[in-house]
Amino acid sequence: MSSERRGFLRTWVVSTDHKVVGIQYLVASAAMLFFGGLLALAIRWQLAWPWTEMPIVGGLVLGESGRVLSPAGYTALFTMHGTAMVFFAIIPLLTGAFGNYLVPLLVGAPDMAFPRLNAASFWIFAASIVLFFAGFGVEGGAANSGWTAYPPLATVPAAAPGSGAGQTWWLVAITVLGVSTILNALNAVVTIVKMRAPGLTWMRLPLTAWGLLVAAALQLSALPVLTAAGLLQLADRLLGTAFYTPAGLYVNAVQPDVAAGGSPLLWQHLFWFYSHPAVYVMVLPAMGFVSDILSVNARKPVFGYKPMVAAIGAIAGLGLLVWGHHMFTSGLGFEMGRAFMLSTMLIALPSAVKTFNWIATIWGGRIRLTAAMCFALGFVALFVIGGLSGLWLAATPVDVYLHDTYLVVAHFHYIVFGGTVLAVFAALHHWWPKITGRALSETLGRWHFLGTFVALNCVFLPMHQLGIAGMIRRTADPSVYQLFDRLEPLNRFVTWSAFGLMGWQLLFVANVVWSFLGGVRVGRNPWEAASLEWETPSPPAHGNFDSDLVIERGPYEYGDAAGERDFAPQARRTAPREA
Amino acid sequence: MRHCALLLVLGLLCGVLAFFALSPGRGWWLPDAASTIAQPIDALFDGIGLVILLGFVLVMALLAWAVWRGARARTDRARSTHGHTGLELTWTAGVGAILVGIALAQLPTWARLRDPAEMPASGVTARVIAHQWAWRFEHPGADGVLGTADDVETASELVLPAGESVLLELRSRDVIHSFFVPELRVKQDVVPGRAIPLWFTMARAGEFELVCAELCGLGHYVMAGRVRALPRADYDAWLAARIIDARSRGAEDAR
Amino acid sequence: MRAFPLPYDHAVDAPRAGHVARAWDSGPPVETARFGTWVFLGSEAFFFGGLLAAYVVLRSASRAWEEPLALGLGLALTALLVASSLAASAAVRALRRGERARGAQRVLWAGLLAGLFLGLQAWEWCQLLQAGFTPQASLAGASFYVLTGAHGLHVLGGALWLLGSACALRRAGSGSLHAELAALYQHFVDLVWLVLFAILYLS
């Protein structure tokens, strides 16, 4: 069938091949990443030069009519930036794009367990993107109560313009996206549990597969709670219930015509019950990619495989118990604050263990500084910074000061951008030859890494100082406060760096184009890697493996004990499959 | 190649450290403290900051050394090490001990900030009412009780006695706001439907900016206020003047 | 600057033609489908867990909480759903013995009983709404309609699944896997109802 030429539609649009679904996810979520980046630039423009005309980006994001941001526009901007990045870009990049593409290949399966369901989950995702954008066009504009959508700001239409129709569209988009994500996670879990090739025991699973498995399990358990919370908020908006609306509100000096008696903090609990684990969904697969890429390029086994697996499990398990640390200043109460502080301190431990294991993995290795390796090393360095600044935030009295300041923004951007996005670039460079059959340029890739690494530190490092100096997040104009006046040069520097960071990404686009036009064609295993996906042709045809496999060992047999070469493939290929 | 990598890492290290070292001098650091609770909070911040600094330098140094050594041109193979139980236990225990230490070190300060047992028994000093997008304050008059005729209301400016513990009652009329005074190191969300207590002691007289730290709609960024700390005598005088003002206004209204 | 030799494997080989695994055209193996359903139900349990947690929090924080629900009606609803569940498991037993016609009949019954449950619940809703117990009037009302509504949508899904597999059983050679999974789902929905019944009607 692979020799058969199928039309564009059947190959790229309605295909149920997990690789095609993965590529569809990759394209869609990369587009969302770019869109979220544009919004970020507009946010930065406003913070550096408040209420001035925005060149270029202003026209793109705001349209010709409103090049100068309004407060409503600004609040909608950061709401949609956060939503686009977390829900529509980063998570789908990991569990959608790489999850779909890699899971069957890593476990030696011909496809996902439920291929049609898999294709359906992408198309539901696409529908949710449409709903997301539809919110921009409604009366009052897009949702503008933050990606956290705290009631009553989000639920009382009189409280903010975006809390009218915009917030309803936002909720519907998030709920539909949630359905897609749950179906996709279901597929990943069933595929990894049930469809591993003969001999692929749990302790022979690559860490990428472990990361994707545990991330999917987290989604299956925590995301439905957000869906339930979203339904309650939808009911508040559409049915006139009062789950989140307390009694006795006066909005704009009038009592809003809504029912009352509910609890605003209930939403925060339910929201963070998923949205904190969502951070681990965004980082566990990335940790998996990095573990694999470090090992391949250091020509050494992953150090402490079993503790690495245990750490992934511990992060996920504890991840369900730390949501309250987003609420230390919310009126959570003394004992609850103490309990969540302790669980938050605990969760730092497995992350630290993983960091030391990564260093020990490359320690004494024969390092090949490929572009993928550069990005993976960059991940480790920046993940460490993000993790360490978390110590300040985990300490409740310090968090009381730092909560909702730019230090929090710096902290999670180091994890999500410095960590996850660099890991995604690492993974792209590493698996690109498998996906397309052609290599990316190593030279361009390393230059891309260098500029990205420097620029992103210039963007996010000064945010620590902004936060320490007290500058609050989500402010449209820091110059309102005398305290923040002296921060102006920092804000401008951050903005310039952000433009540089965005511009530098053109190098990656150029690399992709170069690869398609003239990239080196590669065989099955361009990196001399041991895991299963490299047993397939590049790119693999529908059905993946063209011979039967017998899995003989773990995925990280590199170095002097590996046999005749410096790596020993996980699988022995037996008789080729019959047509 | 590996020279570039080393230069990059060293450059980053020096840049980061220099940037952090220069920041306090430029005012890009904690604002001057003005409450008694600020002292232990700043000490925790500095202590954890030291842990962060050491952790950062240690990890970056190890990383840089590993890459520097590992990227040399060599044809022999690496040792196929799969782990080292003793080493792993050591660093797990080490990191664990540091984390437990940090957790224990902050408990007393957290209790001072939020443990109801620490709440001053003297009664409410002022009520804070947040609404889109301004602050309103109610000071009890001579009787020390809120909700009586001699209450003193102010807009935007909260006046409090310096040097003694004050107890605020935070209320919101519409959405969630957050009462944040950077120089006092206090922050507490103001949740509609609830009266949330907040207490602290101002170490010195002065004027401090009050910031709304929780997104509360379009005017979130302009929801500024002021906290003015007065020595006790001045505070009493201010209050008395305001009470007389309020009475005479009341008398005028009655006429 | 030393550029290490990139270990590109230049033995570019075309994939052998026609190796596409055909196993997927007839759906996933039974064991995989069964496991997938269990995983899905686990996720569903978290969904209802979230709703129930919200209910418990709101109820414990409220002073007045009145649910003017008729216990008799609740018992009738419970009986219908339990009967549906029993019929579904009888159907699965019959199908395991190879009695397709009887199995199909019982699956049909299970689906119809679930439908009856929905009908009775709709009637209950109408009665309650007319009596002034609306979602807007009180948190108790809001919680009641959202909980039973979310559950009712699941019952609807289960009923459609059961009826669909009854049709499949009558027509072709397949369908017994569908019937088994639909029965499993129906048991889950039944279990959730028992919890809802306990907290809404009994307390």
Image (tube, coloured by chain):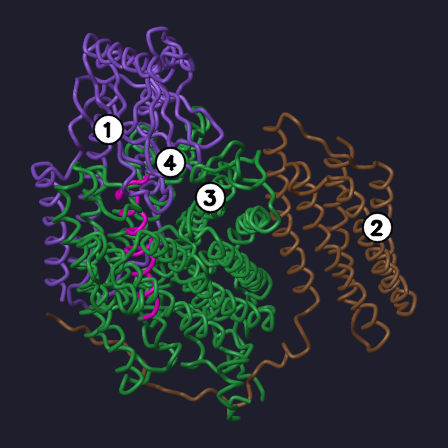
Chain colours: A green, B purple, C brown
Rendering quarter of residue B226: top left
Write the residue at 67% across / 51% down: C150
Q: Nearer the viewer, mark 2 or mark 3?
A: 2
| Labels 1 and 4: the sequence-earlier one | 4
Is residue A217 in view from this perspective?
A: yes
- Name the mark nearer the viewer: 1 or 4: 1
Marks 1 and 2: which is nearer the front? Answer: 1
Q: Which mark is residue A272?
A: 3
CA neighbours of label 2 inside 10 A, class few (<14), some (14 to 19), many (20+): some
Q: Residues within 10 Å of mark 4 (few under 14, many from 20)?
A: many
Residue at image mark 4:
B177
Magenta span of residues:
A404-428
Q: Which image quadrant: the C terminus of chain C? A: top right
The amino acid marked with disc number 4 is His
Mark 3 lies on a secondary structure that is helix
Secondary structure, mark 1, is strand
The answer to whether marks 4 and 3 sit on the same chain is: no
Q: Which residue is mark 1?
A: B226
Separation of marks 1 and 4 at Cα, in angstroms: 15 Å
Q: Nearer the viewer, mark 2 or mark 4?
A: 4
Image position of A545 with respect to B38: above or below: below
Subunit that carries the residue with mark 3: A
| Label disc, if present, on residue C120 of the rendered structure | 2
User: What residue type is disc 3 on?
Assistant: Trp
Q: Which mark is residue C143?
A: none
